Image (tube, grey):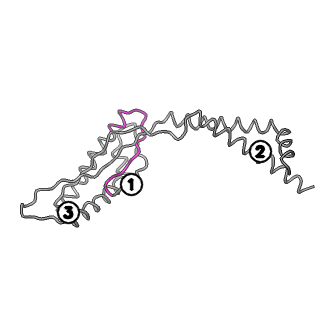
Amino acid sequence: MELRDFISLLKKNVIWIVTCALIGAFTGVAVASLALLHPGWKAEVRLTRELADVPPAFVLDGYYTIETTRAFGVRLGRLLLDESFRVKAASQGATFGRAERFNEREWTIRINAKEYIVAVQSARQLEALLNAKLFDFSQESHEAFLFGAAVSEPQRTSSLFSPGVALLVGGALGVIAAALGVITIRYFRQQSS
C-alpha cells in the first residue's frame, strides 16, 4: 500500500475516524474531570527519635543507632501498610490510600478526602496513633531511643492530565485507533479475496 492509497482509504472512512476521535476526546475529558472532582492529598511521614533516659555513662555506638533506626523504620512501614491501622487512623470522610517508601525513615501516604480540613484531621490522627504505637514499641524493647512519627501538612496531589490535555490525548488516541482499524479491515478484506 502506497501513501496515496493510504490517504484515499482514510478519506473514504473519514466519518468513522472523526467518530472515534470524538469518542476518544469525550472519554479523555470525562476521566480528567472525574479526577478533578475527587482531589487527593499526600502527606510525608518521617520517623523521629530522641534519646531516652539513659545513664550518663551509657555510650551508644553508631551501629546500634543505625540498626535500631532501620528496625523502627521497618515497623513504621508495617503500620502504614496495615489496612486495619489505616482505617482506624482515618477521620470521618477520608481514607488513606497507598503508602510509598522514600527511604528507611521517610514515607509518603495518600489521603483521599474532598476537603482540606478533613485531610488535616486525618494526618493529625495518623500522627497520634503512630506516635503511640512506636512509643509502646520503644518501651517494650527497652531501647535507648524513643521513636515517634512526624506527619507533614497534607499537600494537594496533582492530577495526571488537565481536561484540555486529556481532550487532545483522547482525540489523538481515537484517531490512531480508527486509522489502525481501517487499515486492518482493508488488509483482511484483501487477504480474503
Which residue matches tag 3? 141
Does 116 appear above or below 72? above
Which residue is the site of mark 1?
Answer: 101
Residue 13 image position (x, y, % from top left): 83, 39
**The residue under label 1 is which amino acid type?**
Arg
Q: Nearer the viewer, residue 154 or 38?
A: 154
Single out the residue that lies furthest toward the right: 193
Q: Which residues are magenta?
A: 104-121
Q: CA distance from mark 3 to mark 2?
A: 66 Å
- Distance in Å between CA atoms under marks 2 and 1: 43 Å
**Of residues 61 and 32, which is closer to you in this image?**
61
Instruction: Choose mark 3 or mark 1, whichever is in front.
Output: 1
**Vertical order, 99 against 70 (above or below):** above
Helix, strand or loop at label 1? It is strand
* Residue receiving disc 2: 179
Residue at point 26%, 65% (across, down)? 67
| Residue pictured at 85% horizontal, 43% vertical | 9
Determine the CA span between mark 3 and mark 1: 24 Å
Q: Residues within 10 Å of mark 3 (few under 14, many from 20)?
A: few
Pointer 2 local density, CA inside 10 Å: few below 14, some 14–19, many at least 20: many
Is 94 on the left or on the right of 65, as rendered? right
Choose the circle earlier in sequence order: 3 or 2: 3
Where residue 10 sits in the image (x, y, percent)?
A: 82, 41
